[in-house]
Every structure is written in structure tokens, then in C-alpha cells.
Image (cartoon, rainbow, N blue to C red):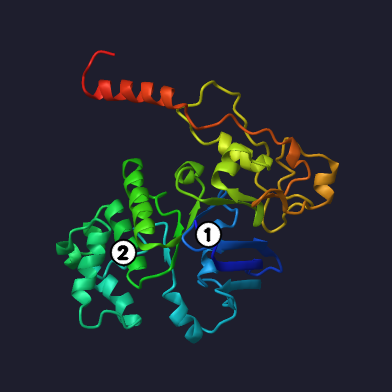
Amino acid sequence: MSDMLFMNVHDLVKHFKVANSSDVVHAVDGVSFSIYRNETLAVVGESGSGKTTLGRLLIRLVEPTSGAIELDGQDISNLSDARMKPLRRRIQMIFQDPYSSLDPRMSVEQTLGEALAIHGLAKHSRKERIAELLTLVGLDPSLAGRFPHQFSGGQRQRIGIARALSVEPEMIVGDEPVSALDVSVRAQVLNLLSDIRARLGLTFVMITHDLGVVRHSADRIIVLYLGKIVEIGAADDVFTQPRHPYTRALIKATPDPFRLRREATEILGGEVPSPIAPPSGCRFHTRCPMARDICSKEEPALETRKPRHLSACHFAHEVVPPISQEPPPRLYQQRLDIIRAAYAGKDT
């Protein structure tokens, strides 16, 4: 990961007005963080935490209520569509649902060619560029004349990836890019994204509710809860030394076939509060097993616990890290040998 700053987010807020009401939904409520060139930054949290809204704010698909988004030092949060157009080449998005994100009336060639035409790219070699993009995402260029309904879910998502790459972006935001795919296909698409990121030197923001998806691919992780950042740090630090009880709960909920011993299941109590009326103080206190009086009265600051590792918890020093999910090499190899032998039909 490079230390060269690419994007800075300052106190970003997005509130949605509720129809026929004076209420507002606090989707994103004052978040600040940085994105560095060539890094993979994961944004994780439960449904309703504000992950998707944050991703769309970063690429200006929705307008912020307040705050600033700086791209290479330039505030893009209030730029007009005309001034944003040349910048949109630099930041692209892969959408969650490959079934609804592609126009069913357009062939693959038309879908990829549209982006090239809008930005005036590859005017004299458009077919060659489309063939190059399809090859890059593992599809046969001869399929360019087909329509979305003629592809599987995994193939459609590869087309979505090719569309994002077509304008040669510097950063891609992946909004749950594998959650709608069959389990057997997810690893293929994740490996593809990892290979492309490394080959092209892209900055990648991965939005997901599944920590297992980013365990070995993210450089840093942001944990969101009800529109607030509760923890941010290097991926290894967040997994092995979480400093917020919500982060710990998410990690404990991640399936781990190599866990050395069984632990009592930790289930968060209560319902997720409404983003229309978020709790006072720490927003997680209504479900937190460590909550005390101060938690409902004072909002904890996002403070540094170690270099580049911040969390927002009054009692961060008391959070007990979960048992490591990293399997010892010997145990991992033993179980891998058993699986291979079983598939080979050998007696184990």
C-alpha cells in the first residue's frame, strides 16, 4: 500500500428526507477518513449501516448534505455535473446486482462502447478495446454481441467489472460485488478483482457485510454502525486486536472452519435502532454487552489506540480480542490433506 493520499473525506453527512414527514434518515452522519493510492480499503457493517450510501457519496452518485470530499486536494462535493464529468473517469463503481445493473436492451458491445463514447475514448479502435476488456475479465471477446440475459450471474458481474474498467479509472468502488453470486463463483470474482487491482495499480474500496470476503484482501478496514465510523485500522490489527465491541461481534459471527476450539456464540441483543432516531451517546450502546451509564450520555470520540488504528468506544481497552482466525500451518495442512485425499477417493 502506498502512503500517497488519493482522497480525503471530512465530516461527510448524508440525510434523506422522509416523504410527507419532517423526519430524516441519518444514513451517513459525520465520517472522516483518507484513502491512499493503490490500497484496498474495506467498508464493513450490517445492513443499514450506511455502507452503500457512503460508496455512492464517494463517486457523487448522491449529493452530500454537508462535509467535503477531496480528490487530490480538490473538493468535489459541490461540483456541477459538467465539472464532474472529466473526474468521473477517475472513480468508477461496480454495483451489487449484476442482474439489474446492466441494460437488458443493450449488447455487451453497446454497454462497453457507451462508456467509451461518452468520454471520447478509443474512437478508432473501439472494437479492439472492447475485446481487450473482455479478455481482461476472463470472457471470450466473441461474446460481445450477446445480451445480458444470455449470461450467468458471474459472467454478468465480469461485464460490470469490464464496464468500470473501460474508462481507465484510478479508483473503483465495489458495492457488495459478490454478494449476489453463488458461493462457488464468489472466489473466482474476488481473485479476478485482486489480480486486476494489482496489475493496473488501482485503488479499491470494497463495501461488504461479510468480513470473510476481505480478511486476506484488504489493507485497511472501516467499520460502520448506523452511519458512524466505530473503528478503522489495518486489516490484521482489526481482526486480531479489535478495539470496539461491535467489531468483535462481527468477527465472531464470521464462520471459521479452522477455529481451534469452540467458543460460546455471542449474539447481539436487541433490534438495530432506527436511523431516523438514532440513540444518544454511543449509537451501539442499546446492543452492547459492555454498555454503562456514560455510553448513553456521551458520544465516544474516534481516538487512536495504536498507530493508524482508531476506535470510538469509552472502554476500548477492555475489549477482548477473539481467538485468532488464522489457522496454524500444520493444522491447516493436515485438514487440507484430508480434503484432497477424500476427493481422490483414498482411505483417510
Which residue appears at 70% of the width and 36% of the height?
319
Residue 64 appears in view: no
- Which residue: 64% across, 34% down? 321
347 to 133, vertically: above or below: above
Q: Could you tell me the amino acid type at mark 2?
A: Ala
Quick check: 203 above or below 311?
below
Neighbour tally class for label 2: few under 14, some 14-19, many 20 plus, Cα within 10 Å: many
Q: Is residue 254 above or below residue 222?
A: above
How far apart are the two marked residues, 2 and 1, measured between alpha carbons?
21 Å
**Residue at the location (22% across, 64% down)?**
147
Front of the two marks 2 and 1? 2
Q: Quadrant for residue 93, please give it.
A: bottom left
Q: Position of residue 291 (x, y in %)?
A: 77, 39
**Quarter of the picture holding the C terminus:** top left
- Label 2 secondary element: helix
Secondary element at tag 1: helix
- The image position of residue 179, as x and y in percent, is 42, 49
Q: Which residue is mark 2?
A: 162
